[in-house]
Amino acid sequence: MDYHNSQIAEIYDAANPLAEDGRFYLALAGQRPCSVLDLGCGTGTLSCALAEHGHRVTGVDPAAAMLDIARRKPHAEQVEWVESTAQNYRSERRFDLIVMTGHTFQTLLTDADVLKALETMRIQLKDGGKAAFETRNPNVDWAAEWDGRQRVIRMPSGEEVVETLGITGKGAEFVSFKTAYRSAQAKLTTNSTLRFLSPQQVESFVARAGLVLRDVFGDWDGSAFDAARSREIILVAKSAN
């Protein structure tokens, strides 16, 4: 999806307020202030919520248009914003918690990119730190659910945008789709591909990157992952030290 487009970024922000996934990661950060790295922070909703709770936050995203929105939000001045991919981000800082939310992990389409992003987590974690991210359960037929799906997104201005998804390709691990946005003012389309890895594949990548798997959840309420019923695979790893 073209998050470098300012209009797409504005629609994304309106469509994705803080929800149960964000509250899960807020709880993971805990009550005591800690340092948090938000990889693929998007329009900064979670980063700013973490900052509001007293955490020291760095938000990283490759799309300048997304970061432009993030910088305008309440508590944004408390966040360090960095334009970078998760794979390439490096800092002298080390973090207590590293998160990758919004199914950003699924936009990593090659083994090399998956490993590089996970290696960033390992390198940037403090000893004893935690890294957490999620991916959708591939046992769910997401292509069937998404094909033709339509919803109305209300923008801050009051304008309504109709979002329509159409599947354009489906393989063993990949689903490609076109997203059309229609409003009284404009028509926009974007193309996206997501990768759906099995829990075993993800766990293997985590180990290869030098991290140690700590927990695997199947829902934002912290329930255990069930391959037949869970829609999410939520992983929490730690540094090997």
Image (spheres, rainbow, N blue to C red):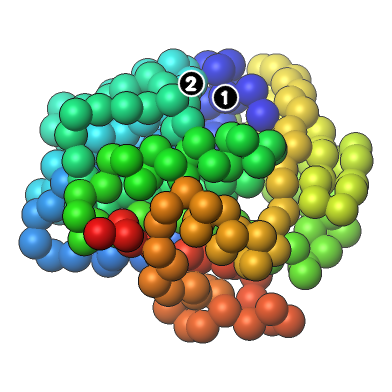
The percent coordinates of residue 77 (x first, y second) are 16, 27
Q: Can you tell which quarter of the image residue 84 is in?
A: top left
Q: Is residue 193 rendered to the left or right of residue 167?
A: left
Q: Is the residue 143 above or below the residue 39 in the image?
A: below
Distance from label 1 to label 2 (Cα)? 6 Å
Location of mark 2 (residue)? 63
Residue toward you, 57 or 111:
111
Could you tell me which residue is drawn at 48 percent across and 31 percent down?
A: 87
Q: Which mark is residue 3?
A: 1
Q: Is the residue 162 above or below the residue 199 in the image?
A: above
The percent coordinates of residue 82 (x first, y second) are 32, 22
Q: Is residue 11 visible from the viewing direction of this image?
A: yes
Callout 2 environment at 10 Å: few (<14), some (14 to 19), or many (20+)?
many
- Image quarter where the C terminus lies is bottom left
Could you tell me which residue is drawn at 90 percent across and 38 percent down?
A: 168
Q: Earlier in the sequence, mark 1 or mark 2?
A: 1
The percent coordinates of residue 159 (x first, y second) are 57, 30
Q: Can you tell which quarter of the image residue 218 is in?
A: bottom right
Residue toward you, 44 or 32:
32
Q: Is residue 112 rendered to the left or right of residue 187?
A: left
Could you tell me which residue is drawn at 28 percent across and 64 percent down?
A: 28
Callout 1 environment at 10 Å: few (<14), some (14 to 19), or many (20+)?
some
Q: Pointer 1 and pointer 2: residues touching (CB < 8 Å)?
A: yes
Could you tell me which residue is drawn at 39 percent across and 71 percent down?
A: 214
Secondary structure under the numbered disc 1 in the rendered image:
loop
Q: Is the residue 10 above or below the residue 221 in the image?
A: above
Q: Which mark is residue 113?
A: none
Q: Is residue 109 rendered to the left or right of residue 142?
A: left
